[in-house]
Image (cartoon, helix red, strand yellow):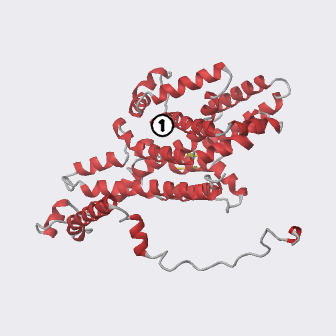
Amino acid sequence: MNMHNVSWVRQDMVASSSRPVGQASVVRWAKNNLFNGWLSTFLTVGSLVAVAWSAMAIAPWLGNSIWRANSLAECRQILDGTPGACWGVIRDRWPQLLFGFYPSLLYWRPVLAFALLFAALAPILFRTVPQRALWFSAIYPGLAYWLIWGGSLWFPAAAYCGFVVAVGLFSVTMRLNQGLAVATAILGAALWWIYAVQPSSTLVNEILPIALDSVASREVGGFLLSIIIGVTGIALSLPLGILLALGRRSSLPLIHLLSVTFIEFIRGVPLITLLFTASLLLNYFLPPGTNFDLILRVVIMVTLFASAYMAEVIRGGLAALPRGQYEAAEALGLDYWKAQRLVILPQALKISIPGIVNSFIGLFKDTTLVVFIGLLDPIALSNSIRADTNWQGIYWELFIFIGAVFFVFCFSMSRYSMYLERRLKTDHR
């Protein structure tokens, strides 16, 4: 027998066979996952008993829900002594919980800003959306500010022009010296924002006459305020966290020291302390007569707080990469920033997705802490609603509604995180 003529490799594919009978049945799944041992069986039965007991206790209360009532006394009169939920408070005060004391005739503006938020996030979060739409994502922050707070369109437009001035000065002076170019760009943008963002009203009307009715920050509250602080903090903390993580791993002593000092100081101070600093102490370090909006101060402090935690999450992703990835980038002849952008950061961010989204969820829930500095978040508004004589004594319904809305936002972020992990296949790359 000629061994050279023997084929040791199959030449045709084996036809797929059907799944064995019973492998996908509910009974088999329950046996493997819920009743695969005495401990698992005990925990499963205990959990079912606890769920059944909770459902039997809550069902009568939810089953006798009252939606049409103008006061707690009216709810109790309708219930006539039987247990029941008085959701009439939500029906009566839901605009206040959503918008705070925002003028009711202008509700269309924050609603439009919230709807446009999804259009701005779509090209960033989903690859099926054309990347050409990123131009709208870039201009959305200024547009949202103008819609919510009103005033002249010149303010957000001039703020964007400051970045144009910085890029122009950097391009012109880059040929002379890189350090000089960076300093010139920062100085030029700062001078533009100081002197050009708020010119005289006459000049504003001549340059850009489009304006909306102004709304004071003290009228912004409810979930509108939580979304403003949360979305802004999330959007800004990620890039700042990346820079801080790179700075902490930098070989330059000054940059490394500054990054470590900032991260450790912020992580060692409670967020509520930073909020009190933004609310009370920051005015003492500003020139007399300076009008520094409280919401802006809170956004800055929340962003700095989240950036420090984000830096540590991303640093963990950078440390998880094998040394060979850095050596491969050097072998390709890439400089530091190209290596980070094309090789290192894409892999580190994929590894860090669960931690990043976890930080985002924690940040969004921490927006309720602004109640302690007098901002009208949903918790503060629930307290004011319960202080009203019509709803004095209401409790569970308000907090269940607030918790449900926060759950929707946080659960959505969690599900997107899982979708992103599956799409990028972080466990196989």
Name the residue furthest front: 1
Residue 390 % position (x, y): 20, 56
Residue 228 showing in the rendered view: no
Could you say which is closer to the camera, residue 207 or residue 191? 191
What residue lies at 26% left-to-right and 61% top-to-bottom? 46
Dot 1 crowding, Cα within 10 Å, few <14, some 14–19, many 20+ = many
Q: Examine the image and state in which quarter residue 28 appears.
A: bottom left
The residue under the point 41% across, 64% down is: 33
Front-lying residue, 134 or 11: 11
Q: Is residue 226 visible?
A: yes
Quadrant of the rendering where the N terminus is positioned: bottom right
Say what secondary structure mark 1 lies in: helix
Is 303 situated left or right of 85 in this image?
Answer: right
Q: Residue furthest left?
A: 81
Q: Position of residue 129 (x, y in %)?
A: 67, 61
Please name the amino acid that badge 1 sits on.
Answer: Val
Image position of 119 (left or right of 343): left
Residue 130: percent from left, percent from top: 71, 60
Q: Is residue 33 above or below residue 206?
A: below
Residue on which the image places disc 1: 302
Q: Is residue 292 above or below residue 368?
A: above
- In percent of width and height, residue 239 lies at 61, 39
- Residue 327 quadrant: top right
In the image, is 177 to the left or to the right of 22? Answer: right
Q: Nearer the viewer, residue 360 or 250?
A: 250
Q: Which residue is located at x 44 percent, y 27 percent?
A: 268
Residue occupying the far top of the picture: 253
Total number of numbered discs in the rendering: 1
Horizontal arrangement in the rendering, residue 178 relative to residue 231 (left or right): right
